[in-house]
Each structure stands twice: as structure tokens, then as C-alpha cells.
Image: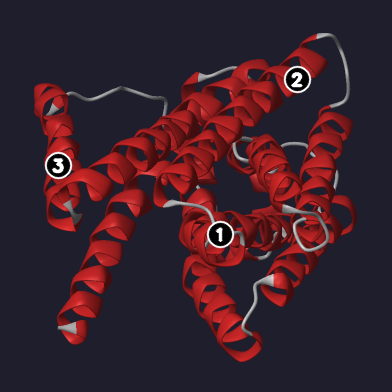
Amino acid sequence: GLATGFAMLFAFRLLMGTGESVAYPSAAKLLATHVEPRHRARSMGTVVLGAVVGLTVGAFLGGWLLGHYGWRAMLITLGGASLLWLIPWFGLWGRRTASAPAAAPTTIAVLGQRALWAGMLGSFCISYAFTFILTWMPLYLVQERGMSLTTMTEVAGFTFIANGIGLILSAWIVDKWIAKGGSANVAYKTVLAVSSAGVAASLFLCTVVGPTGAVIALLATGVLDGLNSPLWGSLAQIFAGPQASGRWMGMQNSVANASGMVAPVVTGYLVQQTGHYSLALIVSAFVGLIGLVAWLIILPTVRPIDWSAEESS
């Protein structure tokens, strides 16, 4: 029944969140400890790219299985395939990577950083738009734009591919910019601003163009959202350093994932009240513009925090 479906969905989100709560903070800690600053964006981009590849494969394969064999076959296949990760994981079980100990700041000191709050707000806003694409885009394309299930699957899949392209471009641009002597502050804030403003503009365009234009706008949204994906993770490493990047990324990621609860509910309510997706798209675009404010105004100069000075102050 419906209650069982909601219970299973809640359990799925809970388990996925449990895994992600370990994966991204751990990755941030490892990269902050072992990767040079000039390679931070590309190294974090590699981590995030894995998730995008999974979404892309899931969109194409899931849509094909749903259309040909039904939802049970889709869930069993995708769920079973995810278990394959356990094979290499257990092969690495028990290995440890030695690192030099460093004095860690208190959680209160971490929470007192303006950069953390800017990162949490900015990542929430960009994740809100991505959550709309992830959860409501299929229904939007079918119900609002009249696409078939097959066409919708193709558009969704190519949107995730576009996201991966944007991710790779962003990581490459920022690292190259810094490697050539450019300011990390200017590099990060410029790309983040282009991403947030571009996502907002693309989502708004979906409300005023025809079906073909909407597809183009969604693909643009994928690219522009991808520009943002690796940067707020590598920013956490720059600001927090090896001493606090795990906790910093955990807090930031938690707030970003809160959009996964807010965006679907708000979108569903607006669609139900208006009978269309236009207002929901406009709200998503507006949230993206709030992210622009976070990156350009609230975020301080991008540079490592001196935790010893913070603790003594």
C-alpha cells in the first residue's frame, strides 16, 4: 500500500544518508591531508563525479527497465548492482593511512566560522535546484511537456551527463586558474557565481519557452549545476584544513541534503495548488539567486583558517 511505499522510501533515504554522511566528510578529510591545494578541485571533482555517473546510468537503465519490465525489475536490478561495491570495499577493509597528527579545533570554533555558514547556505540553495531536477523533472517532462516515458528518460539521462561535463569543467578551470598564479578567492567565487546565477536563469527560462527550449534549458541547468558540485567540497578543505575538514564537510553536507526534504515537498505543494510547474520553477530559480548572495557576499576571502589563532582569541 501507500504507507508501505512511504516507509520503504524513508528507509532508503535514511540508509543512503547514513552512507553519505561518512563518505563525503571522509573524502574531504583525506584530500585535505594528502592532496596539494592546486589539485583540490579536481580531486574533489573525481569523488563527486562518481555520484553523477551513478545517476546517469540509473536514469538510462532505470527508465529502460521500467518501460520494459516494470518497477520491481528496476528496483531489484539497481539495488543489486549497488551491492557490487562491497567487493572492492571489503578488499580494502582494515587498511590504514598514516597521517601526521594535528591539533583539532573545537566544534564551537568550527561553528563560529562565517565561511561555514556561507558554504551551508550556498550548498543548500544549489542542491535545492538539483533536487528539483532529480525528483520532479521526470514528472515535469511527462505532465507539463507531454513527453513519452522513453523521451523523458533520454532527457533526464543527458541532463545528468551535462552535469558531469560541468563538474569536470569547473574542477579543471579552478585548478588551472590557481596553478597559473591566479587568486583562489577570485577563481572559486567567479565559478560559483556563474553556476548559481546560470542555474537560476535556466530554470526561469523553462517557464517561458516551448518544449524544445525547455529541454535545452534543463541541459544548461545540468551543466551549470555541475560547475558548483566539486567546489563547495574543496572550499571546505581550504578553509578547514586537515584538522577540521571532516566535521566542516559533514555539517555542510547535512544542510545541503536538507534541500532533499524541502524541495520535493514545496514543489509538490505548488504543483498541486496551481496545476502547473511554473511557480515551482520560479521558486527554485529564486533559491538559486540566494545561493549567489551566499557565494559573493557572505563567503569571506578564500584562504586557510589559522585555528591556533581562533582558539586563542
Residue 252 visible in this rendered orientation of the protein? no
Height in image: 17 above or below 7? above
Judging by the rendered image, the residue that carries numbered circle 2 is 173
Q: Secondary structure at mark 2?
A: helix
Q: Residues within 10 Å of mark 1 (few under 14, many from 20)?
A: few
For the residue marked with disc 3, what is the amino acid?
A: Thr
- Between the C-alphas of marks 1 and 3, the distance is 28 Å
Q: Secondary structure at mark 1?
A: loop
What quarter of the picture does the C terminus occupy?
A: bottom right
Height in image: 162 above or below 113? above
- Of circles 1 and 3, the one toward us is 1
Residue 93 visible in this rendered orientation of the protein? yes
Residue name at image x 33 percent, y 45 percent: 63
For the residue marked with disc 1, what is the amino acid?
A: Gly
Judging by the rendered image, the residue that carries numbered circle 3 is 77
Left or right: 170, with 8 as reference point: right
Color theme of the render? secondary structure
For the residue marked with disc 2, what is the amino acid?
A: Ile
- Of circles 2 and 3, the one toward us is 3
Q: Residues within 10 Å of mark 3 (few under 14, many from 20)?
A: some
- Of circles 1 and 2, the one toward us is 1
Residue name at image x 40 percent, y 40 percent: 55
